[in-house]
Image (tube, rainbow, N blue to C red):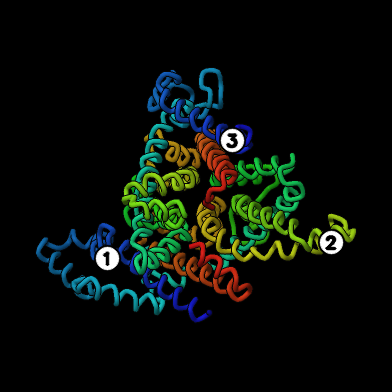
Amino acid sequence: MIARGVVTAAGLLLVASVLVFVLVRAAPGDAVDVEFGESGASALLSSEEEAAARAQRARELGLDRSVPEQYVRWLSRVVRLDLGISFRTGRPVADELVERVPASAALGGAGFLVALAGAWLIGLLSARRPGGLLDHVLRLLSLAATAVPTFLLGSLALRYAAEWIGYPIAGEASWRRLWLPAVVLGVGAMPVVARLLRASLISEYGRPYALAARARGASPARVTFRHVMRPAFTPLLTLAGLTLASLVAASVITEVIFSWPGVSEYAVAAISAKDYPVVQAYLLLVVVVVVVVNRAVDVIQHLLDPRVGQAAEVMA
Amino acid sequence: MTVRRWGAGYGLFIAGAVLVAVVVLLAVAAPLISRYDPAAQGVGPALAGPSDEHWLGTDRFGRDLAARVFHGGRTTLLATAAALALVVTVGTVVGAVVAALGSVVDRAARHLFDLLVAFPVMVVALALVGLWGPSLGTALAGVLIVLWAPFARLSRSLVRSALAEPSAVAARALGAGRWRLLRYEVWPRLRGPVLVLAAVEAAQLIGVVAGLSFLGLGAQPPSAEWGSMLQEGRAALWSAPHLVLAPGVAVLVTVLGLTCMAEGLRDVLDRAGQAVPE
């Protein structure tokens, strides 16, 4: 099972790497254009000299070879984590990215926890009486929360938190600065999680063991917390995969608004500066994280409950 | 039956549709509603708050914000609608073709769809903007590269299950041709869920493009467009938050309307025992 997961992940990564390569290659201007444009060397050379210098540089970079050959060379460099040098800072891109991963992971993790805590509360309250008033109100609130754009919530939260409670708008990554972007991130991911937990709680309440517990005289609270809670939370794992994409997307906006020194903030700054190696490395990093997390979730689910995969197989 | 048809889902769907219709109407009728030219500078004092003269206030060049929000809706909504029509068509057709082909193609395609669906749209759009330079077109193209996949995945699985239905098998046994099957067996089972997904993805599309523009990586000033207005407003967040608030709320209302439509429709389908997309 694990072996199959690894093979699928490797296959997907290979496909994804071709897509990334094509995307980067299809962009206007290659590395030679960028170099000659950047250094302004062309002003000092005649047009023939420049053409010769360009051809020379293209040969050095291997750009005169066939496209499949270039892809293989590119991939072998990427696999060795040689992601090139940042145009802006002159440092290896891999090093700069690695330095920023902890901050992004902390923000993403904290955001996920906020989403989970909020969704837990919403799920419990709305599953108590499905179709009841509270259920409807919470559902409308969830809809509203889904509709609030991250940039609006984020920028208003930053502005008014800074004005009213002296939230530090700039500075190092610290706990004091983490909570607000984490809440903004969490609110966005909350409705999806809450919907899943609600459905799962309702289906557990309807199972014979829960009814039996009620019949034996266990209070609703006892049934909820002692009996139903744990099985209802098994689909939690699916959530990690489900919310990952939305968390990554929302963290792009959140990191920039809160000047949180994470990977996305770095990438956005690089984009504005046309720092191609960084853009490419960022794309690769996200591809790897998405594929690995999704495959891992799949495999762990199979290991925990072999029925899950079979059901999915039948439905697909 | 009638009672069931007019259940909670219907109300929510209608409410969402009304919201979206109002937004579209305001955008279409923009020249009739607002007294000011959205591009005219100095029609009022710079950075003024809302007043009787200027319902939503003015921006840093003294342009009327209400006029800009209404007119801006035209670009934003039109671009979104065009992009959405494209991904819905391409995705649905690709998914149906793959399902009809079956075997190896089908299985390989399933993995590709899964990969693309799991991928954050925002990041692809960011990368494309990074490589091609910021513009509304590039941002949209980045979104389109991935956004057809959810439709392909949905239509693939719906077409497969529809063709396996007893009625479809019977129709085929009676000699129904490909088009007849498509029209009477597949399409009725496909349209509802595709519509739900279309509303969900339209909301996402608007959100992502507005978010990119907010970062200065989408639509560029001085065009009156919600995204570019957000970007201009961001610079003045501290002194005049209404500059972000006006186009931000416009995005919010549109997304809310679309979300309500999707949610309501989902209820209606659910009650009718049809497949419901995530």
Compare marks 1 and 2 and give the one earlier in the sequence. 1
Mark 1 vs mark 2, foreground winner is: 2
Residue A129 numbered tag: none
Q: Which residue occupies 42% across, 53% down?
A: B170
The residue under label 1 is A31
Q: Position of residue B15 (x, y in %)?
A: 57, 32
Res A161 quadrant in image: top right
Do dots 1 and 2 share one subunit? yes
The residue under label 3 is B5
Residue at disc 1, secondary structure = helix
Mark 1 vs mark 3, foreground winner is: 3
Furthest-right residue in view? A217
Q: Amino acid at mark 2?
A: Ala
Residue at disc 2, secondary structure = helix
Tell me if label 1 and label 3 are in contact, CB under 8 Å. Answer: no
Q: Position of residue B8 (x, y in %)?
A: 63, 37
Rounded to the nearest whole Å, what is the CA distance between mark 1 and mark 3? 61 Å
Q: Amino acid at mark 1?
A: Ala
Residue B120 in the image: above or below residue A99: above
Residue A268 in the image: above or below residue A48: above
Q: Foreground residue, A304 or A114?
A: A304
Res A283 quadrant in image: bottom left
Mark 1 is surrounded, within 10 Å at the Cα level, by few (under 14), some (14 to 19) or many (20 or more) other residues, namely: some
Q: Amino acid at mark 3?
A: Arg
Residue A279 falls left or right of residue B246? left
Furthest-left residue in view? A48
Q: Which residue occupies 40% across, 33% down?
A: B224
Chain letter behind tag 2: A
